[in-house]
Image (cartoon, rainbow, N blue to C red):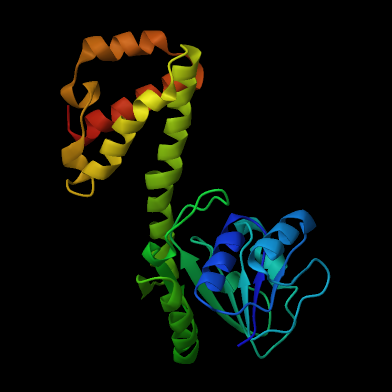
């Protein structure tokens, strides 16, 4: 099977690497950013192009959600399978006279961070049983956790991921701003962060909650608000309100 990955960002890089590590041949990686494509090509020994899209049986589109539709129009071949890797978009966003599917890896991807690909959940949605078999076979070579998901369910999977990953990481960034402002090394907080994440492997998140809001400690909450300003103050108030609401304090 001839497989082409379209894109040169974090998802494209990691999927290409996962394919190569699991001996799944790639005919090409295609995109518009020649610098990034060249770096991926040199590391993984995959041909690349910014101009000519190779003929393939399977095209995997790894671009931003806002670009998926337009990029899908570049594929003019009819007898092929085209998938996107978006958590939120329906497979019908793909525009062309080809078979359409979604191939969603549930993970946060950064080129500089190594990943254990076999632990990544893959959620697949296809138009027919034959395409499901093809994608299951490919994904199962990469991961031990492959399953079907409708678009409706996948939207909620992605929404949950935003809360569990993107929002949490933003709070880490805000926390570092506070520690940096007082010249407190952020490394001091890494054991706390590690324990917080590790704890929810064993305890329900709701049961693991600690801190002044769940204790309804008004004096500490007021003190903290006096130390904050602008966006961080608004985040602090919003988060504490949400915690109190959850525990009906």
Residue 134, horizontal then vertical, whole percent = 49, 86
* In this picture, residue 178 sits left or right of residue 19: left
Residue 124 image offset from top left, x and y in percent: 44, 74
Q: Is residue 176 above or below residue 67?
A: above
Q: Which quadrant of the figure contains the C terminus?
A: top left
Total of numbered circles in the picture? 0
Residue reaching furthest to the right: 51
Closest to the observer: 1 or 243? 1
Q: Is 207 left, or right, of 139 in this rendering?
A: left
At horizontal 40% and vertical 70% (from top left) the residue drawn is 143
Residue at left offset 16%, top offset 40%: 207
Q: Is residue 23 above or below residue 70?
A: below
68 to 138, vertically: above or below: above
Which quadrant is the N terminus positioned in? bottom right
Q: To which quarter of the image does residue 189 belong? A: top left
Q: Is residue 128 above or below residue 71?
A: below
Picture residue at 79% right of the left edge, 58% below the top: 34
Please provide percent x and percent y for residue 88. Answer: 50, 60
200 with respect to 178 (left or right): left
**Left or right: 223 as drawn, with respect to 180:** left
Q: Quadrant of residue 129?
A: bottom left
| Residue 161 image offset from top left, x and y in percent | 40, 51
Residue at the spot x=80%, y=66% of the render?
Answer: 50
């Amino acid at each position: 099977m001839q497989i082409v990955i379209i894109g040169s960002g974090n998802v494209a890089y990691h999927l290409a690497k996962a394919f190569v590590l699991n001996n799944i041949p790639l005919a090409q990686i295609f995109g518009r950013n020649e610098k990034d494509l060249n770096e991926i090509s040199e590391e993984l020994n995959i041909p690349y192009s910014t101009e000519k899209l190779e003929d393939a049986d399977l095209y995997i589109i790894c671009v931003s959600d806002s670009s998926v539709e337009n990029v899908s129009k570049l594929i003019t071949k009819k007898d092929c399978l085209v998938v996107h890797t978006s958590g939120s978009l329906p497979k019908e966003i793909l525009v062309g006279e080809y078979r359409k599917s979604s191939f969603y890896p549930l993970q946060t991807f950064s080129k500089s961070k190594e990943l254990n690909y076999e632990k990544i959940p893959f959620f697949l949605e296809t138009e027919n049983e034959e395409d499901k078999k093809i994608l299951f076979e490919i994904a199962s070579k990469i991961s031990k956790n492959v399953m079907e998901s409708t678009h409706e369910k996948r939207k909620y999977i992605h929404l949950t991921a935003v809360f569990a990953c993107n929002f949490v990481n933003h709070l880490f960034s805000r926390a570092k701003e506070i520690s940096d402002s007082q010249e407190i090394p952020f490394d001091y907080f890494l054991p706390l962060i590690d324990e917080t994440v590790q704890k929810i492997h064993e305890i329900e998140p709701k049961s693991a909650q600690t801190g002044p809001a769940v204790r309804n400690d008004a004096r500490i909450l007021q003190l903290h608000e006096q130390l904050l300003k602008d966006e961080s103050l608004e985040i602090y108030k919003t988060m504490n309100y949400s915690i109190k609401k959850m525990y009906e304090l």
